[in-house]
């Protein structure tokens, strides 16, 4: 069974020859050049033989065209891309944020890299294009200050900018599907309990999220990535996507709860730190549990989030072998 058919069947809850597996990492030193990023992503695909490719843009690509500069110096050591400078210092600065042309700048770079990658893979593997939710982009622009701005009553300043970010993100998602992506990997990185409540998310996040997901509605493998612990599943649970990816074991829902009560397929099951550090006993248990709870159906085994550099490469072969061994527990 080819990878596209395998993943498509898994998403649809149909029989597969093997349970699909994937993971992703950052491409520090290559992700600012579309050709190099596509080449290194292709090499990653060939080396680890993943069943689905998530585009491996830098984690801050969505803010570059809005006037930010980046610091990627710590990524190769296990750190993350950070904002070196931002145009937003106060609520009044949100008027600087305007809708961007996706055919210029960083957004064009990401689409060009997607085109190169699609050409190299020749339809042999599903590719999902990484998209940040509008509020995630706004949060990245300000290091989290957008939440304070909204909670402190500056919605009149923030919302026009959020509209511009959403318009840009919708255009990006639509174009990625038109180019040939199987879907989007829609990263919602701040919809979890903490500084804000569900009412905040229902007012300032969900309506904008749904516009972007609608723009990608022609994709057959749209994945919702809910980042962090204590995610607001009651807010996220009826998003119109096919696949749900979250930090299983760190945040509810429980996988069998999701599979029984909701139409999503699961992408997850593995703790990314256990993958990074090659903790085999934990990985064995996690693989057993996710396959047992799902009976191997509607399942793509993966970490709940990016596996940061440097990671233990031998863990990947162990995971794949263990998945194949565990398939026998399915009816």
Image: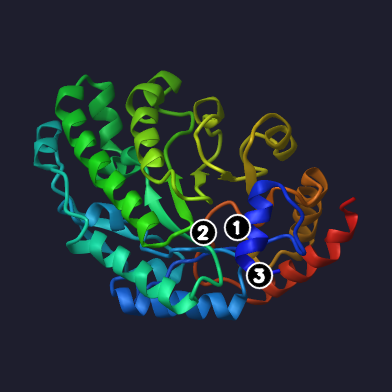
The mark that comes first in sequence, 1 or 2, is: 1
Q: Which numbered disc, 2 or 3, marks the residue that appears first in the sequence?
A: 3
| Disc 2 + disc 3, Cβ < 8 Å | no
Is the Cβ of the residue at disc 1 closer than 8 Å to that at disc 2? yes
Residue at 70 percent of width and 40 percent of height: 255
Find the distance from the CA under tag 2 to the CA under tag 3.
25 Å
Q: Return the disc, 1 or 3, that comes first in the chain's sequence.
A: 3
**101 w.r.t. 232: above or below:** below
Numbered mark located on residue 4 in the image:
none
Q: How are the colours assigned in the image?
A: rainbow
Residue 285 can be seen, yes or no: yes
Reading the image, the residue beneath label 2 is: 306
Q: Is residue 18 above or below residue 37?
A: above
Kindly indicate the quadrant of the structure image that contains residue 110: bottom left
Q: Which residue is mark 1?
A: 272
Which residue is at a point 30% across and 52% down the rendered structure image? 172
Residue named by callout 3? 2
- Placement of 16 over or under 297, stated as above or below: below
Q: Is residue 181 left or right of residue 51?
A: left
Where residue 306 appears, as percent x and y from the top left, is 51, 59
How many numbered markers are drawn? 3
Task: Rate crowding at label 3 as few (under 14), some (14 to 19) or many (20 or more) other CA atoms within 10 Å.
Answer: few
Residue 21 shows in this picture: no
- The percent coordinates of residue 311 (x first, y second) are 57, 71
Q: Name the residue at 35% across, 70% down.
A: 115
Query: Badge 1 local density, few (<14 within 10 Å), some, or many (20+)?
Result: many
75 shown above or below 182:
below
Q: Secondary structure at mark 1?
A: helix
């Amino acid at each position: 069974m080819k990878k596209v058919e395998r993943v498509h069947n898994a998403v649809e809850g149909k029989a597969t020859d093997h349970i699909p597996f994937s993971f992703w990492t950052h491409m520090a030193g290559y992700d600012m050049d579309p050709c190099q990023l596509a080449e290194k992503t292709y090499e990653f695909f060939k080396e680890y033989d993943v069943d689905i490719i998530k585009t491996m843009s830098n984690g801050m690509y969505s803010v570059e065209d809005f006037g930010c500069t980046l610091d990627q110096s710590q990524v190769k050591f296990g750190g993350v891309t950070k904002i070196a400078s931002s145009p937003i210092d106060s609520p009044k600065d949100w008027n600087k944020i305007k809708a961007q042309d996706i055919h210029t700048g960083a957004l064009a770079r990401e689409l060009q890299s997607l085109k190169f990658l699609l050409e190299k893979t020749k339809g042999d593997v599903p590719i999902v294009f990484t998209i940040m939710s509008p509020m995630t982009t706004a949060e990245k622009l300000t290091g989290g200050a957008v939440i304070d701005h909204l909670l402190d009553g500056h919605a009149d300043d923030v919302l026009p900018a959020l509209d511009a970010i959403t318009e840009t993100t919708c255009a990006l998602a639509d174009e990625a599907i038109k180019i040939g992506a199987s879907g989007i990997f829609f990263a919602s990185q701040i919809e979890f309990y903490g500084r804000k409540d569900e009412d905040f998310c229902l007012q300032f996040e969900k309506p904008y999220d749904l516009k972007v997901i609608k723009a990608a509605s022609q994709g057959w493998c749209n994945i919702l990535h809910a980042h962090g612990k204590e995610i607001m599943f009651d807010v996220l649970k009826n998003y119109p996507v096919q696949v749900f990816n979250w930090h299983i074991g760190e945040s509810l829902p429980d996988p069998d709860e999701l599979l029984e009560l909701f139409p999503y397929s699961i992408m997850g099951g593995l703790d990314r730190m256990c993958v990074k550090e090659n903790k085999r006993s934990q990985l064995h248990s996690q693989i057993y549990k996710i396959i047992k709870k799902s009976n191997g159906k509607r399942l793509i085994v993966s970490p709940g989030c990016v596996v940061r550099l440097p990671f233990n490469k031998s863990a990947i072969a162990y995971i794949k072998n263990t998945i194949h061994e565990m398939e026998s527990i399915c009816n």
